[in-house]
Amino acid sequence: MHGRRLPSWAWVTALTAGALAAVTVLAVQAGSGPRPPAVPTAQARPTSTPSPNATVAPAPSETAKHEIPTASGEGRRIVYSLGERRVWLVDPDNNFDDSFAVWPGSISPEKGPYAVSFRREEAAGSDGVDIEHVVYFAVKEGLSIAFSNAVDGASPQPAPGTSTGGIRVGIDAGSAIWKFAALGTKISVVD
């Protein structure tokens, strides 16, 4: 007598439950690391005198604000320049809709093409800071690489010796990237 075969929906349910359990374990591990204090950026503070401990967005050159890096692909995509510390949201006709300065983590993705693989509205960053608008696209050295913004608008300084894969942006930029970056959206990482 042959054994009874499980229906395909049972296999899909079991695999989905296993994947959710694995993601939950990774999220708990990421949230249990040290939590450095968030340091507000000059944009988030009401005063114009920067604190000596504040992390301020790099001042992009005028060229960076107005030109998409060459060799960054074609069509609708997000372009992330490691050297300029900037992202561009590029429309299907290769015009950029918006461009933002970023604060990269200690682990940067390799240059090349990627795609948005996962999105999460809220999370705790690998540095313990509450973040939102999390757009994942790569993994390096066991850490997820993602764009996000701190819920309180701060740009935290990573704790010494802490590895982080978060590419932080301001609140407005986080909202714009979130709206632009559906699952599968192309991301091009360039110099």
Image: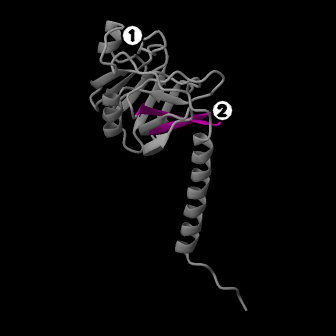
Residue pointed to by mark 2: 141
Counting the numbered discs, the total is 2
Q: Is residue 16 left or right of residue 176?
A: right
Q: Residue at x 39, y 35 (%)?
A: 151
The label nearer to you, 2 versus 1, is 1
Q: Residue at x 44, y 23 (%)?
A: 155
Indicate whether residue 156 is drawn in magenta. Answer: no
Residue 92 makes an appearance in the image: yes
Front residue of 55/69: it is 55
The amino acid pointed to by label 1 is Pro
| Relative image position of residue 184 (x, y in whole percent) | 42, 43
Label placed on residue 50: 1
* 60 versus 174 height, above or below: above
Q: Quadrant of residue 84?
A: top left
* 60 versus 187 height, above or below: above
Q: Residue at x 59, y 40 (%)?
A: 30
Q: Is residue 173 left or right of residue 116?
A: left
Distance, label 2 to label 1, CA atoms, is: 34 Å
Q: Residues within 10 Å of mark 1 (few under 14, many from 20)?
A: some
Q: Which residues are magenta?
A: 135-150
The amino acid pointed to by label 2 is Glu
Please, what secondary structure does the residue beneath circle 1 have?
loop
